[in-house]
Image (tube, rainbow, N blue to C red):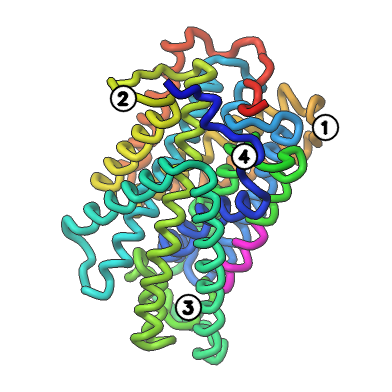
């Protein structure tokens, strides 16, 4: 059987490829899947929610960058957690939450792909949406089977196409509207501070793709320098693109119209601003962006699950499949993502992902602050600020969801309890002595 080490190749991902992977995940989810849902919570101020999300994400990225600079690893977040808490249930549970949030992101973007592709046919629901979502997940699986360099090249090409196309959409929409902002027109609904802060939780999801870079640390060229650079470049590129598009959508549609078309707001905004041709081009662009987003996410989460298996933090069964562990985790990833894409709508998928990711993020910040800040030369005040910002956003998001959809709060709570209980039984201890990270594959 092929050695697991052979599936990780040192220097197989360039700085440009790493940035493309990060922006691939971020832009696929952030613009096409979340713009309308963020507007539903933040109202006319929804473009500013992307700025707030970028600020919170930049503070959060500090922990990941400091740890990855010290110990670059193909395990990324799993390595960070294990270095902080040891191979116990806290590290295992939080790592699983991260993996699940990434799988949730895959299903979110896959359903967004289906929603946009069906817009020219005026199909908003029915069995075709989950069917197309599953189809694009299977496509991502097949491309990933071709190996790292195929993923990196495809991601780089797709990132260039969609960033340029989406930026042009935003500029054209603003230009055609005379730089007016229709979303700021009078609205019958009031939007408070809690709603704006809660919308930041979804905006954070639009940036969390930077963790894709962390999870491929040992495979990136000059990882001690390029992991951090790739993360900050990705966040910077995305905030510019997000603001262009948010203002482009807001210039074409009122806030009520954005909320009504929240699952396909860019396509809805393109028609009045750019005509039928612009509408069709936006649908094509959405298909390209979301397909590449699924591809990049599948690439990262399958390797993270493989590393968790290598670290003996989760059990593993081959189920009779040949080949290395990473190929098995690739299969598990696409099966779970496809199942979620069939069972949940976009709103609930996004909410579940936000809960899982924010809790995991807080566990990482506390772990780095409590156990590793001296080792990595991190400033405690920055780590505590990141922790506090996550807590504020999570509290506001929970309050809003308890009012609008209490069941998703219950699903999230039950899911997190189940994850940590499972890890506690499997690993028999909450916190274990810290160990050295698994060596980077290819060393």
Q: Which residue is mark 3?
A: 183
Residue 186 lies in quadrant: bottom left
Q: Residue furthest front?
A: 1
Q: Secondary structure at mark 4?
A: helix
Q: Secondary structure at mark 2?
A: loop
Disc number lying in front (2 or 3): 2
Question: Which quarter of the rendering shows the N terminus?
Answer: top left
Given residues 316 and 394, the one toward you in this image is 316
The numbered mark, 2 or 3, whose residue comes first in the sequence reads 3
Q: Position of residue 210 (x, y in %)?
A: 59, 47
Q: Is residue 33 left or right of residue 68?
A: left
Tell me: residue 386, above or below residue 159. above
Task: Provide the residue designation for mark 4.
Answer: 214
Provide the major secondary structure of the magenta segment.
helix
Quarter of the image where one finds residue 413: top left
- Give the answer, above or below, for where 80 lies relative to 106: above
Label 1 packing within 10 angstroms: few (<14), some (14-19), many (20+) = few
Left or right: 15 in relation to 194:
right
Q: Residue at x 54, y 76 (%)?
A: 247
Q: Residue 85: x and y, percent?
A: 62, 19
| Marker disc for residue 321 | 2
Q: CA distance from mark 4 to mark 2?
A: 28 Å
Q: Earlier in the sequence, mark 1 or mark 4?
A: 4
Range of residues picked out in magenta: 235-244
Identify the residue position indicated by label 1 in the image: 377
Marks 1 and 3 sit apart, C-alpha to C-alpha, by 45 Å
Q: Quadrant of the C terminus?
A: top right
Pick whichever, 8 or 368, lies toward us: 8
- Give SS at disc 3: helix
């Amino acid at each position: 059987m092929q050695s697991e080490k052979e599936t990780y190749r040192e220097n197989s991902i360039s700085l440009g490829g790493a940035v493309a992977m990060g922006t691939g995940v971020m832009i696929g989810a952030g613009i096409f899947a979340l713009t309308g849902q963020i507007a539903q919570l933040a109202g006319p101020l929804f473009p500013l929610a992307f700025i707030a999300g970028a600020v919170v994400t930049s503070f959060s990225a500090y922990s990941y960058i400091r740890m990855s600079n010290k110990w670059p690893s193909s395990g990324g977040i799993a390595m960070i957690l294990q270095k902080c808490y040891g191979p116990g249930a806290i590290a295992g549970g939080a790592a699983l939450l991260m993996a699940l949030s990434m799988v949730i992101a895959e299903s979110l973007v896959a359903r967004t792909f289906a929603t946009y592709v069906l817009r020219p046919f005026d199909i908003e629901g029915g069995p075709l949406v989950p069917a197309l979502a599953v189809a694009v997940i299977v496509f991502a699986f097949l491309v990933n089977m071709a190996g790292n360099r195929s993923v990196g090249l495809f991601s780089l090409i797709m990132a260039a196409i969609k960033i340029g196309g989406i930026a042009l959409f935003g500029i054209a929409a603003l230009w055609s509207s005379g730089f007016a902002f229709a979303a700021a027109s009078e609205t019958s609904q009031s939007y408070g501070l809690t709603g704006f802060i809660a919308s930041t939780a979804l905006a954070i999801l639009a940036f969390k793709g930077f963790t894709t870079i962390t999870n491929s640390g040992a495979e990136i060229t000059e990882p001690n320098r390029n992991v951090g650079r790739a993360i900050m470049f990705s966040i910077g590129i995305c905030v510019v693109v997000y603001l262009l598009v948010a203002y482009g959508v807001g210039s074409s549609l009122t806030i009520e119209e954005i909320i009504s078309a929240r699952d396909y707001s860019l396509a809805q905004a393109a028609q009045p601003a750019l005509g039928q041709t612009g509408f069709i081009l936006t649908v094509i662009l959405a298909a390209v962006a979301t397909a590449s987003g699924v591809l990049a996410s599948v690439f990262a989460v399958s390797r993270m699950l493989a590393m968790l298996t290598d670290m003996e933090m989760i059990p593993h069964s081959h189920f009779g499949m040949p080949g290395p562990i990473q190929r098995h985790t690739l299969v598990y990833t696409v099966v779970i993502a496809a199942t979620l894409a069939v069972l949940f709508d976009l709103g609930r998928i996004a909410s579940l992902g936000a809960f899982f990711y924010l809790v995991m993020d807080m566990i990482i910040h506390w772990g780095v602050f409590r156990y590793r800040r001296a080792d990595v030369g991190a400033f405690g005040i920055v780590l505590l600020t990141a922790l506090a910002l996550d807590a504020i956003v999570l509290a506001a998001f929970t309050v809003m969801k308890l009012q609008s959809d209490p069941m998703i709060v219950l699903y999230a709570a039950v899911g997190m309890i189940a994850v940590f209980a499972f890890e506690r039984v499997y690993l028999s201890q909450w916190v274990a002595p810290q160990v050295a990270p698994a060596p980077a594959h290819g060393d």
